[in-house]
Image (tube, rainbow, N blue to C red):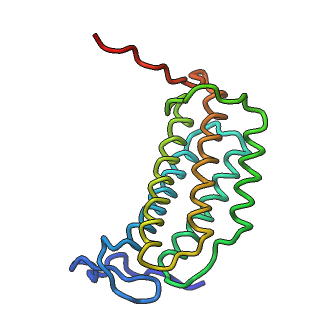
Amino acid sequence: MGNRLSRIYTRTGDDGSTGLGDGERVAKDAPRVEAYGTVDEANSSLGVVLAIDGLPEAVHQCLLDVQHDLFDVGAELCIPGHRVIMDAHVTKLENSLDAFNADLPPLKEFILPGGGQAAAACHLARTIVRRAERRVWTLSRIDAVAPEVPRYLNRLSDLLFVIARVLARQSAAGEILWRRSATPR
């Protein structure tokens, strides 16, 4: 493969526009750009999780696979009409979710984001994926989005919640359960 970028800056976006994958110029805050930009942010947040030492190999490999998928999600959103994410991608997330969840005790309380560095980073990634999903739904109201994309993001946020539980239970911090606040006097 040849060089994809010979120069990092182009100055073409200095007017507040950016190019989609099909060459169309749109505003940098257009719903499509917001959607794939937030997917990119989610992918970067997974990079933070993956940079933490001591992740279980199964978690590391799962999240690395997800990073590749998220790059494809971003490409699909960046190129109108392009299709990459299919039902099989969603099914793979569901299978991973079921496998990681199998040994966890049932939830009886809400869990606070935290539970050690890796779990907290995973919770942050989960919330960014939820925002990406919301941005995709916003885009879908004005332009075509394949139904697998928001389903993938929805399952991914669930998977990240379960992985955060796994990581918290493996850390010294453990899961932090929410306690109902007493009524202030």
Q: How many marks?
A: 0
Q: Residue at x 37, y 75 (%)?
A: 8
Furthest toward the bottom, the residue is: 23
Looking at the image, which residue is at 50% across and 30% down? 112
- Left or right of 125 on screen, residue 17: left
Position of residue 23 in the picture relative to residue 158 (left or right): left
Residue visible at 50% across and 24% down in the picture = 178
Q: Where, by quadrant of the figure, is residue 7 drawn? A: bottom left
Q: Which quarter of the figure is the C terminus placed in?
A: top left
Above or below, 51 against 105 in this view is below
Percent across and percent down for residue 163 are: 64, 41
Residue 110: % across, % down:
55, 29
Answer above or below: position of 134 versus 168. Answer: below
Q: Residue 75 at what x, y percent from top left?
A: 53, 75
* In this rendering, position of residue 126 left or right of residue 166: left
Q: Quadrant of the N terminus?
A: bottom right
- Give the image location of residue 103, x and y in percent: 78, 33
Report the residue at 73% width, 32% height from top: 104
Q: Residue furthest top?
A: 185
The single residue placed furthest to the left in the displayed view is 15
Question: Depth check: 109 or 2 in front?
Answer: 109
